[in-house]
Amino acid sequence: MGRLRTILIVLILLLAIVGAVVFLLPNITGGGQVPATPAGDGTPAPAVNIAQVPTPTPLQMTEIVIAVQELPRGIPIPPNAVALRPWPLESAPINGITNLEDVVGKIARTDIFREEPILSNMIVSDLTSLARVGSDAAAILPDGSRAIAVPMDRLTSVAYGIQDGDRVDVIMSMLFVDVDEEFQTILPNRVTLVSQDPETQQIQLTTAIEGRLDPLGFGNAVVGPSERQRPRLVTQRTIQDALVVHVGEFPPDGRFIGVPSTPTPAADGGEGDAAQGDATAVPTPTMTRPNIVTLGVTPQDAVVLTYAIEARLPLTFVLRSARDTSRVATDPVTLDYIMTEFNIQLPGRRPYSIEPAIRSIRQLIVEDQLQLGTDTATGGGG
């Protein structure tokens, strides 16, 4: 009996094991379903087939050169300072380096930190190409061009209409006067006559202004000027298709592309004014208007602009169309040009006139009246 009981127990265990295998086999092979979980309203949720769950796509990797120690700017990169490390292909830098031979022995162009990918623009072959960062202006300046800063105001900058990336022409105005070729002073010259008294033998000096002899009814007379020589104005377009690199001053780090300008906040009226006014009032920010512009021109045009700045010649910038790259010759404009081109007739002398007498005409005044030959603008009346 004891042996029979043992055999029965073994058979029951075998049957239990076979039943468990039959029940679990579909789930193990992926053909089963996850048991349904009752929903909030008591109804059973649909079962989820495990076979429908997508298999994760393996992450594609590549190898790029990484700095394994800090590399100061200007140091030759030793072999033990870099290594190849796996990097996700989707986020790998475009200018990343994949060969150690392209890095070892090169010079660090910038400070490279530990575990930082080494890019192609971070290394140079010699010290002549070494630079810490460089400015945005140098990066966008066309090949063969030179950048030069020129003063401007609202009248000469198309009412502050010119912006970074525009193209402009430069108009220059000059005043001409007659000078003594030897003295290089404005004519007429001052003449000093020396005479000696025959009785006293004293020397007498008589100073006069150089003039011309005009015969009059009672004899000859010397006619001199009644005022200082009047300069002759000429205006001409000089530089064409200059690139506006930047309007205003550059930031200290040279970065201005894509960086929004920060408005200068309005002056605070004090605690007393704030207490009397609306507590929710917010000061309106005010923009400081620029007074300088940087142009990209040819090397020779840069010299021309430098001469104009040193000579304090008025410069006016005219905005070009974004689609216009032509170069058109212009004529210098003088009083004779205006009289001839627009058929302006010189009025004759008449035995009559109007009252009151017209002694001046209306001048262009926009808050400040610009005057040629002065260092600063003078205030104009309304």
Image (tube, grey):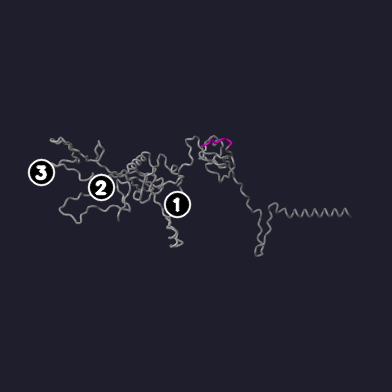
Which SS class for mark 1?
loop
Report x, y in % for residue 205.
18, 38
Query: Three-letter amino acid code at disc 2?
Result: Ile
Q: Residue at x 66, y 58 (%)?
A: 47
Q: Which mark is residue 338?
A: 2
Q: Closer to us: mark 1 or mark 2? A: 1
**Left of 360 or right of it: where is 94?**
right
The amino acid type found where label 3 is placed reads Phe
Picture residue at 28% right of the left edge, 52% below the top? 363
Quickly name the residue at label 3. 218
First in sequence, mark 1 or 3: give its number.
3
Any mark on residue 128, and which?
Answer: none
Q: Quadrant of the N terminus?
A: bottom right
Q: Position of residue 167 (x, y in %)?
A: 38, 46
Q: Residues within 10 Å of mark 2 (few under 14, many from 20)?
A: few
Stretch of the chain drawn in magenta: 74-80
Q: Between 244 and 132, which is closer to the camera in this rendering?
A: 132
Instruction: Quickly name the residue at label 1.
Output: 262
